[in-house]
Image (tube, helix red, strand yellow):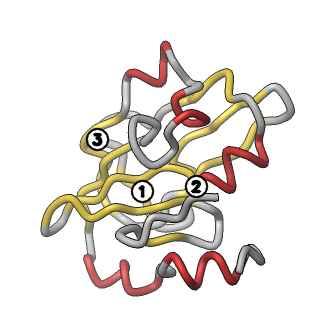
Amino acid sequence: MNFPENLLYSEEHEWVEKIGPKKVRVGITDHAQSELGDIVFVELPEVGKEVTAGDTLAVVESVKSAADVYSPVSGKVIEVNEELNDRPELINEDPYGDGWIAVIELEDPSELENLMTADEYKRMIGEE
């Protein structure tokens, strides 16, 4: 499994990439997409939606089940990955790249300190 060192991770299997002083890109981890199996639909959040850390951000449906994607941070959704409407399988193919879900403008950048490093995440899921 792949766990990029430059990302932060949540206990609910989301990743966070800092892309600006107050902006982060969010998606689900390689581990999460492999547990879900083939993803067939993604219900994206609305641009402008205010989210609190722990709120449902999106819903990902696979051939096996549907799973909520939780927002790892609080803030406002300022961009969503529209390409997932036509190609939800991008999450399976490239979870840390083209399979991103949303960009969130952070309400409080210090919330990032609550997330895990790649090594901490690997320990949590027993991948060490």
Image coords of residue 83 (percent x, y):
40, 21
Amino acid type indicated by mark 2? Thr
What kind of residue is marked 1? Val
Locate residue 81, reporting x and y percent: 37, 31
Q: Secondary structure at mark 1?
A: strand
> In the rendering, which numbered label is found on residue 51?
1
Is 119 displayed left or right of 68 in the figure?
A: left
Disc 2/disc 1 C-alpha distance (Å): 20 Å
Q: x, y percentage for residue 76?
A: 29, 53
Q: Quadrant of the C terminus?
A: bottom right
Q: Secondary structure at mark 3?
A: loop
Q: Residue at x 27, y 76 (%)?
A: 108
- Write the residue at 48% across / 18% down: 85
The residue tagged 3 is 48
Identify which amino acid the numbered label 3 is placed on: Gly
Crowd band around label 1 with a 10 angstrom C-alpha radius: few (<14), some (14–19), many (20+): many
| Secondary structure at numbered mark 2 | loop
Q: Tell me the residue that label 2 is attached to.
A: 29
88 and 34: which is toward the camera = 34
